[in-house]
């Protein structure tokens, strides 16, 4: 966390897009198993089709989460290896709860920043 007088000129928001997408992935996988493109489509729907993560963002995050033991993946057809499904692990559920708690304030701060910009510029 930055000190009060420490200015961050590189980022206006308190949480990165990557961190939010990781949180969304864990949220979705806590409810059901899914495959990568399904996760992309689901995020797009949740965000009213105003934004969707690219495969270049999702698949490295899925590999990272799997390497860390937060999710587990399996191939629908191990020979063809065409569709890889993922589900959250018990460790991943604990990790998700921690991230959810830790990010709530940062997300609220980011919303406040946007609301302040909107108010200043458009009202």
Image: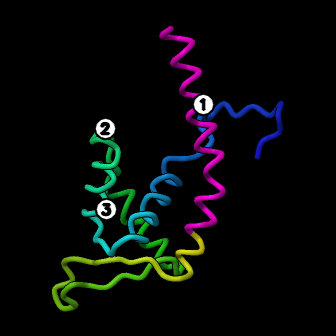
Q: Position of residue 69 (x, y in %)?
A: 52, 81
Task: Between label 2 and label 1, give the one nearer the viewer.
Answer: 1
Q: Are marks 2 and 1 in contact (CB under 8 Å)?
A: no
Q: Position of residue 11 (x, y in %)?
A: 60, 36
Q: Secondary structure at mark 3?
A: helix
Residue 9 to residue 17: above or below: above
User: What label does residue 67 carry, if any?
Assistant: none
Q: Secondary structure at mark 2?
A: loop
User: What label does residue 39 carry, if any?
Assistant: 3
Horizontal side, residue 83 vs residue 20: left or right: left
Q: In whole angstroms, how far apart are the C-alphas of marks 2 and 3? A: 15 Å
Q: How many neighbours does mark 3 have within 10 angstroms: few (below 14), some (14-19), or many (20 or more)? A: many
Point out the residue furthest to the left here: 80
Q: In whole angstroms, how far apart are the C-alphas of marks 3 and 1? A: 28 Å
Q: Which residue is mark 1?
A: 112
Name the residue: 38% across, 78% down.
Answer: 87
| Mark earlier in primary sequence (2, 1) | 2
Q: Secondary structure at mark 1?
A: helix
| Mark earlier in primary sequence (3, 1) | 3
Q: How many marks?
A: 3
Q: Which residue is mark 2?
A: 50
Magenta-colored stretch includes residue 106? yes
Task: Between label 3 and label 1, give the one nearer the viewer.
Answer: 1
Point out the residue furthest to the front here: 31
């Amino acid at each position: 966390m930055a000190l009060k007088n420490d200015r961050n000129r590189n980022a206006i928001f308190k949480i990165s897009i990557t961190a939010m997408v990781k949180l969304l992935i864990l949220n979705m996988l806590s409810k059901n198993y899914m495959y990568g493109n399904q996760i992309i489509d689901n995020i797009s729907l949740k965000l009213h089709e105003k934004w969707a993560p690219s495969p270049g963002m999702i698949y490295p995050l899925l590999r990272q989460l799997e390497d860390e033991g937060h999710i587990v993946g399996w191939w629908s057809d191990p020979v063809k290896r065409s569709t890889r499904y993922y589900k959250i692990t018990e460790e991943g559920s604990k990790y998700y709860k921690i991230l959810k708690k830790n990010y709530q304030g940062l997300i609220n701060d980011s919303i406040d920043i946007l609301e302040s910009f909107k108010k200043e510029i458009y009202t």
